[in-house]
Amino acid sequence: MATIRQLLDKKGHEVLSVEPDETVLNSIKKMADKNVGSLVVMEGNKLVGIMTERHYARNVFLKGRSSPTTPVRDIMETSVVFVRPDQSVDECMAIMTEKAVRHLPVIDQGNVVGIISIGDLVKDKISDQTFVIEQLVQFIHGTR
């Protein structure tokens, strides 16, 4: 069973972050430039929140706020659901489903060491299933 550490080793440990006083507009631009759906919100080395496209849509756009003047701290989620590197992909999928989140920061010894999305987990599961199917086909056809 794959762990989040293994998944991050394949995908990379890059964590895009923003400070709480950054404007929502600059944060959304950063997400668009990097083609990601979330940013962790950091004060120094401390994780203080997460901002996602969903937070923008629900707390800025739908409420008629101004992206250039609204700080991230006004729309970010401060009760951040996170995981540890030793947790399994299956555990993380269950957490995402239960908590209705699409992005999970990965915390190791108090430090953010990565972030995973539901897409990362699904891609990993499909890769595992493809491997198993290929092995079964080879076994059935006696090509091993």
Image (tube, rainbow, N blue to C red):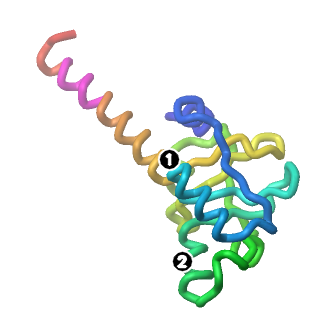
Count neighbours of disc 2 (C-alpha within 10 A) and say few if under 14, some if 14 to 19, many if 20 or more. few
Residue at the extreme left of the image, as rendered: 141
In screen coordinates, is 94 left or right of 69? left
Q: Position of residue 109 (x, y in %)?
A: 82, 41
* Circle number at residue 90: 1
Residue at the extreme front of the image, as rendered: 68
Q: Position of residue 52 (x, y in %)?
A: 59, 65
Q: Is residue 132 visible?
A: yes
State the extent of the magenta-drawn residues as a range.
Answer: 132-138
Q: Position of residue 69 (x, y in %)?
A: 72, 78
As for residue 134 lying within the magenta part, the answer is yes
As for residue 54 lying within the magenta part, the answer is no
Measured along the vertical axis of the image, is residue 53 above or below residue 7? below
The one of 76 and 119 positioned closer to us in this rendering: 76
Marked residue nearer the N-terminal end (1 or 2): 2
The one of 7 and 23 positioned closer to us in this rendering: 23
Q: Position of residue 130 (x, y in %)?
A: 29, 33
> Could you tell me which residue is drawn at 72 percent across and 70 percent down?
23
Count neighbours of disc 1 (C-alpha within 10 A) and say few if under 14, some if 14 to 19, many if 20 or more. some
Where does the C terminus fall, quadrant-wise?
top left
Q: How many numbered discs? A: 2
Measured along the vertical axis of the image, is residue 4 above or below residue 52? above
Three-letter code for the amino acid on which mark 2 is drawn: Ala
- Tell me the residue that label 2 is attached to: 57
* Circle number at residue 65: none
Three-letter code for the amino acid on which mark 1 is drawn: Asp
Query: Circle 1 sits in a helix, a strand or a loop, which is it?
Result: helix
